[in-house]
Amino acid sequence: MVAEADCIHQSIPVLDVQYRCIAKEIEEIVDMSAAAAAAAVAVAAAPSSSVLRQAERGPEAAPAAIDVNVSELDLRTSDAISNVSVEPLQFVPSIRSGSFADIGPRSYMEDEHIRIDDLSGQLGSLIRCPIPSAFYGVFDGHGGPDAAAYIKRHALRFLFEDSKFPQAMEANNEFVQSVENSVRESFLLADLALADDCTISSSSGTTALTALVFGRHLLVANAGDCRAVLCRKGEAVDMSQDHRPIHAAERERVEQCGGFVDDGYLNGVLSVTRALGDWDLKMPRGSPSPLIAEPEFRQAILTEDDEFLIIGCDGIWDVMSSQYAVSIVRRGLRRHDDPERCARELVMEALRLNTFDNLTVIVVCFSDEYRSSSASPPNGQQEPPRLRCCKSLSAEALFNLRSWLENSSGN
């Protein structure tokens, strides 16, 4: 018999320890304060009959670790753990992309595009921005290739140098609004630069669509009829509005500025109402103009539901809907998980549907979902054979199957 038990108190260095708390079927990492850790140890060391019985058996039978039941701690009233902080895990895009361009049935190519999956790495010390960061642009020229080529060549300077791009390491709402203002200014600066460059014809212009990713924030700027489409759980979400004279809002603006729409064309000449360049159709600087370079913006906070983004020139959208394009890319990613092949397949489908324009497509993936699903088995192991499903059975096969089942049940 044990007459009494001596409690030996030993000072223990206090450490901040990570405890894993499970509540409401959601597992979270909780950083417990030092006082919370001490409280847990106190509960574990509380005298009980089971502990005394363990002491009788000797030190060899002592457990290597003591499991502390979280329910024994009064998490709601204990002052010792008032500083517990729980930070939910947030989706972080894993960015990869591919692109493809084709001259189509035209005699010369007027499209240009930019694809940068790691913007911070590309720009180096030029800017400080949240990560991951990426930049994409499609420029569909008209009246010759000069304007689109010029914008591609100077796009990074217009966006990140001349427009005083904001500097930050966190992509909050204030930062995104500052980025929007900066991108708007860069579009207008690029438009003026085309007017000032004597090597660019005043009849040459280009539409422009850019997409920026900072952390979970997606920001799309568009002037013209290129289009960006987000795939969200298989559904197409348009991230831009085509700026064509047939749209009521654009037509109203054009007519208020003294322009007109004839047979779907701005002033009977141009099929878009917003573009960079085309200064032979624009009013003098500072005057309202039917044709403008100001972009429209759309934003999205990326989540696990957002699979990829398609950016394409109007040669794609002239012959297929946004949802049809999303279905093609989604099917391709599930089959081979290659965004560049998906971009090519989209271009080939547009050619099959008899598009009459140049073709450019960028496909940007936001997760490794398709990569993991299509990856080959590790260590050279062969994939287990898939079961083959027979859609229908003949009458004779059904009779034989029924007989076999009856005989089996009889035995």
Image: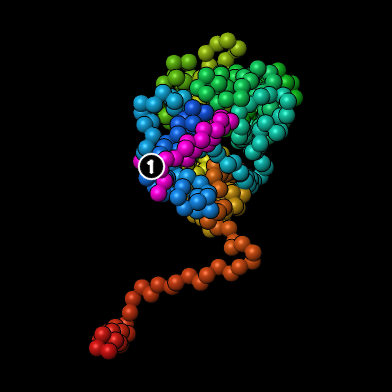
Residue type highlighted by circle 1 = Ser
Q: Position of residue 170 (x, y in %)?
A: 57, 25
Relative height, residue 19 to residue 180 (above, below): below
Image point 52% across, 23% down: which residue? 172
Viewer-closest of 383 and 110: 383
Q: Is residue 274 magenta?
A: no
Viewer-closest of 190 and 82: 82
Q: Quadrant of residue 80?
A: top left
Image point 37% across, 37% down: which residue? 72
Image point 38% across, 31% down: which residue? 75
Which residue in the protein does label 1 denote? 48
Q: Position of residue 382 (x, y in %)?
A: 59, 69
Q: Residue furthest top?
A: 286
Q: Position of residue 225 (x, y in %)?
A: 52, 33
Residue 228 visible in image: no
Q: Is residue 14 magenta?
A: yes
Q: How many marks?
A: 1
Answer few, some or many: residues within 10 Å of disc 1's Cα (few below 14, many 20 plus, some between 14 and 19). few
Viewer-closest of 380 and 337: 380
Relative height, residue 135 to residue 183 (above, below): below
Magenta residues (range): 1-27
